Image (tube, helix red, strand yellow):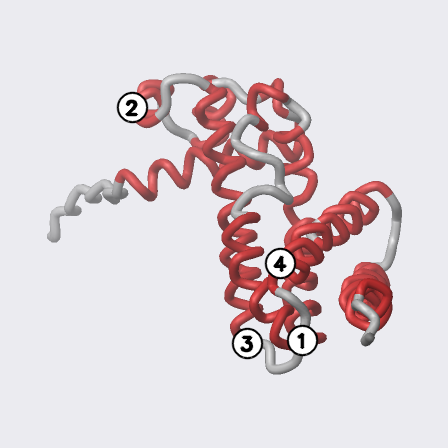
Amino acid sequence: MEVAQPKQRRRFSPEARRAMILDNAAEIVAEHGVSSVTMESISQSAGSSKSLIYKYFTTPLEILRELLTRELRALRRLQFAAAEEANTFEELVRNITHEYLTYIDKRGLIIERLQADPAISETGALIDYGRTASVDYLAPIVAKHFDMPEELARAATDISFGLPASAGEYLLREEADLQEIEDLTVSMIVGTFVHVRNEFLARKQKLPR
């Protein structure tokens, strides 16, 4: 007769445990709101002890701030990867916009609730997170593609960042079609750069004498 061997407990890395805590906090935020996130509620949701939670985080606020940071970083990584796959300027704008709106459609409620709390949103506004790096990446592309001064391309690129953010807010607020909002946003962004090149530069260009 074989003797049953005791099951070995699965070991998780510290990174995996932190991710598990954040995942459960995200579920609580989505279902019940930020105020429902406590060490007790997370431990119950995760099926673990509070002492384990305290091993990695000291307060619920620390958890929520890291959760927001994780969400924003994940979004920016997806956008940069999508940008690298583009072959035309429209594809560049569409790929970045698509990743943004798709992410907001899935995770926007969590981000919105986290950012609504000033104590949590000190991490940084959604459109500002990684904004400088994004503008640094896109502005030279815009300047070269539209044959405009890089300073002007940088300004137009930076300002255009507000359009996807507004589209994301609209998507969360209204029962709108995701594809339709994406198409509209892409048209508005591309149209902005075309307008800057065709009209703004022409009006500002010095007259030949």
Residue 89, placed above or below residue 47: below
Work out how far the residue at label 1 is from the one at label 4, CA to CA, in angstroms: 12 Å
Within-10-Å neighbours for mark 4: few <14, some 14–19, many 20+: few
Residue 54, placed above or below residue 11: above
The answer, for residue 179, to whether it is visible in the render is no
Asked whether, in this view, residue 200 is left or right of residue 3, the answer is: right
Instruction: Report which residue position mark 4 lands on.
Output: 151
Answer with mark 3 or mark 4, whichever residue precedes in sequence: 3
Asked whether, in this view, residue 80 is left or right of residue 49, the answer is: right
Instruction: Report which residue position mark 2 lands on.
Output: 55
Q: Amino acid at mark 2?
A: Lys
Of residues 72 and 129, the one nearer the viewer is: 129
Instruction: Report which residue position mark 1 lands on.
Output: 147
Within-10-Å neighbours for mark 2: few <14, some 14–19, many 20+: few
Q: Residue at x 64, y 53 (%)?
A: 103
Answer yes or no: do the residues labelled 3 and 2 have beta carbons within 8 Å? no
Query: x%, y% of residue 155?
Result: 67, 54
| Foreground: disc 4 or disc 2 | 4
Label ID, residue 85: 3
- Helix or strand or loop: what does disc 1 sit on? loop
| Foreground: disc 3 or disc 4 | 4
Work out how far the residue at label 3 is from the one at label 4, CA to CA, in angstroms: 25 Å
Q: Amino acid at mark 4?
A: Glu
Asked whether, in this view, residue 39 is left or right of residue 135, the answer is: left
Answer with mark 1 or mark 2, whichever residue precedes in sequence: 2
Q: Amino acid at mark 3?
A: Glu
